[in-house]
Structure formats: C-alpha cells, structure tokens
Image: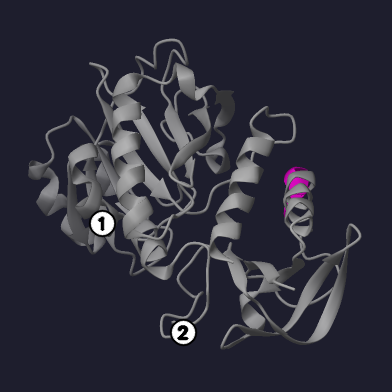
Amino acid sequence: MNKFGMCFSRDFEGTSPLSHIGKKLPVYLRLLEFCQKKGWEIYILTRKTYTGGNNFSGAWLFQNGKFKRIEKDIKIDLVFDWVGNLLFPPKQDKGLKVVNIREFKELTCDKWKAYRVLRDYMPRTIWVGALENAGKNLSRIKSDKIVLKPHDGLRGKGIFIGSRRDLKNFKPEKRGQKYILQEFVETSNGIPGLTSGRHDLRIVIVNGEVVWCHVRNPVPGAYLANVAQGGNITEVDYSEVPASVKRIVKSISRKFYIDYDNPIFSLDFGLGPIGQPLIFEINDQIGFPRWEMKNRDTFLNALVKNFSSKM
C-alpha cells in the first residue's frame, strides 16, 4: 500500500498534529479523506523526524477520521511538503519524492531568483542585498513610491511600501536580512467586474490548469493584501478574470509544468493604472479555500490528481 504524507515543521508531540490549522481544519481533513479513498496510507509528518532515505522516525497515522501517533520508522512514498522554508527537503537528499521538487521551492523562496525567471511579467526589480545599500539604488526605480522586500520573506512580513524619503525610517524585522527593491504598482483602479480598489489577484494552478482564484483587498489606507496583514478574500470565477491575465497564466503554467515536474503554485497579480497585469509574487505554499467556497473540492481533487501522477 502506498504511503502518503503531509509534512510540517512542528515538534513530534501529542496526537493533534493539525491543531494549528484553525478554522480550515475541515478542509484539510477532507483532503486526507480523498487521499484515503485512493487506497493510500495517510500520515501527517514533521521534518524534525526525517532521517533520510524517505524514512521518518515517527509520524501521525490518519485513520477513521482520527490521528494516532506512530513511534516506529515509516517509509513514505510521496511527501506533500508544507514546511515553508528550505530546511526541508534536505538539498542533498535526491531520493525523497516530494510533490513540489526542491528546485521549484528554491525558486519560490527567493524573490530575486523568481524575478530573473519572470521578469517580463513583473515590476522592475533591483537586487539590494544589505539594507544600507537601498538608498544607493533608489535612482534606478522610477515610481514615486517604492517597495522594499526581504528576498526570502513570507506573508507580507518585513516589507516597506512608501515614499523614498520615508525609507530612512524603516526598521527591519531581523538583522542581516537581504533585500530587493521594486517599482510600486498602483492598483487602486481595481479589476473591471471583480474589484474596485487596491487588490492582489491570486490564481492557483495545479496540473497546469487554474483550479481556484480569489481577490485579496487590503484594509482601507493600506497596501498589503495578505490575510496575515489584515486583508480580506473574495473568491472569483476564472471566467471573469481579464484575458490579459489569462494569457500570462497560460504561458507560465505550460513552462513550469515541464521545467518543474507539474508543480502546485499560485501567481499573485495586480492591474496597474492602465490595466496592465503584473505579477507580484509566486508561491508554492497556498492557503486552502474556506469550507464554504464553491471551488473547494475542485482544488482538493486537483491536488489528489497531482499526487496520483507522482505516487
């Protein structure tokens, strides 16, 4: 029987390995149930028990809707990596079969690397490195406002968006961080038929096809639409997305399907003042839909199809 595991960074303790998921827990459990119907053994894993060679020295078995902590060694056939950083999978471990291969994860975890691949579709971006170099590079950015991002940041943390003169007041979240500098794209004109103000349009792609999309809007007066920064989400139909966005999605999804072994990912778009779509970010860690969203099962079934193709 094939063994499938979803891997996080949590400590190996207790019998509630998904307690951190919160209100979306029923959606995660539904995914595990769909996987179970394929006849697989289902586990929740932690990178902290990975010993190499596809082996985990302990995991949580999902069975009959409940979790059971297993202390023995488990050899996993396919891992759905939900760790969120490059600590897993180990770079030197070429044998571990992971849903998104490490080369793709390295691309999504490094905004400068992502820009070099997607530069035709992104705002002008400059490598800054150390924070003290930012001021020297401001002349290379033409927009009135600027965006300064940690090159490896997540959830909108540690980002500065504002005027050039206010950059001197920016306080980094952690020392030694490396940065990129980006042109600011004013999205306040919205997306015709979808949203009327500042936005971030997320397109989720699985098996080379769009399976779910939504608009995120920042709180009034803010720029960042990340949910972690207070933004809100509205599910939208892909049929209503502008054709200019669809053309870019089609091109990138075809390329990534071939180059990165059919990855699961999302693209975050914004439409500028004249309606030009630009990509803000690419992500391999996709927040699941809420239970009430109509494309919930479309998304989950696409994940299972992806897993089956790699099992």
Instruction: State left or right for residue 45 relative to residue 258.
Output: right
Asked whether residue 164 appears in the rendered view, the answer is no
Q: Relative to residue 247, is residue 28 depicted above or below?
A: below
* Magenta-drawn stretch, dominant element (helix, strand or loop): helix
Residue at 48% from the left image edge and 47% from the top image edge = 207
Asked whether residue 163 appears in the rendered view, the answer is yes
Farthest residue in the left direction? 139
For badge 1, the amino acid type reads: Trp
Quarter of the image for residue 7 reads: bottom right
Give the structural element (helix, strand or loop) at label 2: loop
Give the structural element (helix, strand or loop) at label 1: helix
Along the viewing direction, whichever of 199 and 35 lies nearer the viewer: 35
Residue at 88% from the left image edge and 72% from the top image edge = 68
Residue at 54% from the left image edge and 32% from the top image edge = 231
Q: Relative to residue 56, is residue 137 depicted above or below?
A: above
Instruction: State left or right for residue 61 relative to residue 93.
Output: right
Instruction: State left or right for residue 290 relative to residue 311.
Output: right
For badge 2, the amino acid type reads: Asp
At which x and y percent is residue 110? 33, 60
For disc 1, the marked residue is 112
For disc 2, the marked residue is 93
Whether the magenta-drawn stretch holds residue 116 is answered as no
Along the viewing direction, whichever of 57 and 280 lies nearer the viewer: 57
Tell me where the magenta segment starts and ends, as one range. 21-25
State which tag comes first along the sequence, 2 or 1. 2
C-alpha separation, residue under disc 2 versus residue under disc 1: 25 Å
